[in-house]
Amino acid sequence: METNQIFETIRMIEEDNLDIRTITMGISLLDCIDTDVDAACKKIYQKITRCAKDLVSVGDQIAREYGIPIINKRVSVTPIAAVASAAKATATDCVQYAQTLDQAAKAVGVDFIGGYSALVEKGFQGSDSALIKSIPQALAETDFVCSSVNIGSTKAGINMDAVKTMGTVIKKTAEQSDLGCAKLVVFANAVEDNPFMAGAFHGFGEADTVINVGISGPGVVKRALEKVKGESFDVVAETVKKTAFKITRMGQLVGKEASKRLEIPFGIVDLSLAPTPAVGDSVAQILEEMGLESVGTHGTTAALALLNDAVKKGGVMACNHVGGLSGAFIPVSEDAGMIKAAENGTLNLEKLEAMTAICSVGLDMIAIADKTPAETISAMIADEAAIGVINQKTTAVRIIPAKNKKVGDHVEFGGLLGSAPVMQTNEANSSDFIQRGGRIPAPLHSFKN
């Protein structure tokens, strides 16, 4: 790097909240499969603790040497429903797998472990149903385990039986633990190399172990746009693209260095702009810097489309191996600008749903009243899945029914999870729609063979 680039990077770190959000080690558990639950759990613990024993220390070492904050070190594993199927695992057995993951995460010192997952976009098999049934208890009895369920894809359509089930699972999870729903995400078109939680799992097409990096830098992008105030959108797009290039270069540097030191293949850099509740680290404020009085007003979706596209264009120029979700995250509770807009009423669920046609993930970290029916939550999942399936993109729902809270109340989650106002859901009934079950067929454009 040239001297001026080094100083620029230092300034971005010190002033603009630039960081590496996560180094995530993906670990295959296929060689841990056993017909005996106890034997499988023993193998799982041994493999995770062997492969990831140096992950945290290496991450800290790189952060010190390069002066780059690395906020989280995480592990993702093969979807546990598949691993547990050989043992014909019950829901109780599945909780044992979750506890093993939690113990392994604590032993190696990572922040989260993802992969307590099931892929049921076309139907249930093996231990899928047992794992899904166990999610409320598993998340209540563990500290670091994250769970995900993929209920739809462009190739398969939407499994509405799974959608119906997940509405109930989310309600039960909220009843059993305050933060359980923050560690549970329901996907359509889930990707196999996502380093971000709660949806990370290690896909079947991945190498045995791999290092994936998730970058972050909303504050850097906002600061860059402050310098082109009043300029045309051509200038705005070019500015975001150049900034994303610099951020991604840093992510690639960290990923390759971690790969070399851990002697594990480098996988991908995820280009997602991940916000935090910290002032100046907000995706919403980037959109407002483009000229919106408040995120959620008319023009928000167009501004988000420009941002997402420009980030991807800059990122793919900077790194050969880009993957994961790679787009702007809009989690309400984790973004200071989103929180403010939701509180003042300019941002509602309907606008958020429109924005999810553009960005990564979807209805993310949204608090709703605990009296919200399970069928309403299922219908919200179905809507998000439809956006993903039709648009051939990843969408997801991470909804949190807040205990003893009503619309307008405030919920504190703490740390990177932030806080959020309880948002209004549509009170018209969706029960008959959800009770139909079955499968919404894949769209015609899915047939590409």
Image (tube, rainbow, N blue to C red):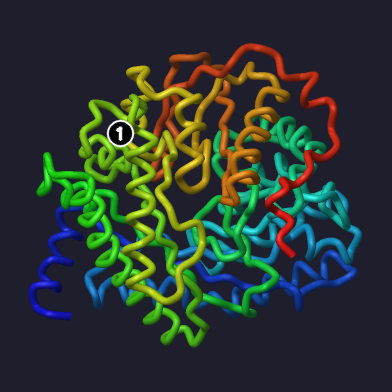
> In this rendering, is residue 156 above or below 42?
above
Image point (87%, 55%), residue name: 125
Q: Position of residue 267 (x, y in %)?
A: 50, 75
> In this rendering, is residue 74 above or below 4?
above
> In this rendering, is residue 13 above or below 368?
below
Image point (50%, 24%), residue name: 350
Q: Position of residue 430 (x, y in %)?
A: 72, 19
Q: Nearer the viewer, residue 60 or 212?
A: 212
Position of 263 with respect to 396 (left or right) is left
Q: Which residue is mark 1?
A: 337
Quarter holding residue 251 = bottom left
Quadrant in which the N terminus is drawn: bottom left
Q: Identify the element where label 1 is drawn.
A: helix
Question: Looking at numbered disc 1 in the image, what kind of residue is underneath it?
Answer: Gly
Q: Position of residue 163 (x, y in %)?
A: 74, 37
Quarter holding residue 343 = top left
Q: Nearer the viewer, residue 44 or 316?
A: 316
Q: Residues within 10 Å of mark 1 (few under 14, many from 20)?
A: many
Image point (33%, 67%), residue name: 248
Query: How many marks on residues?
Result: 1
> In this rendering, is residue 187 above or below 255?
above
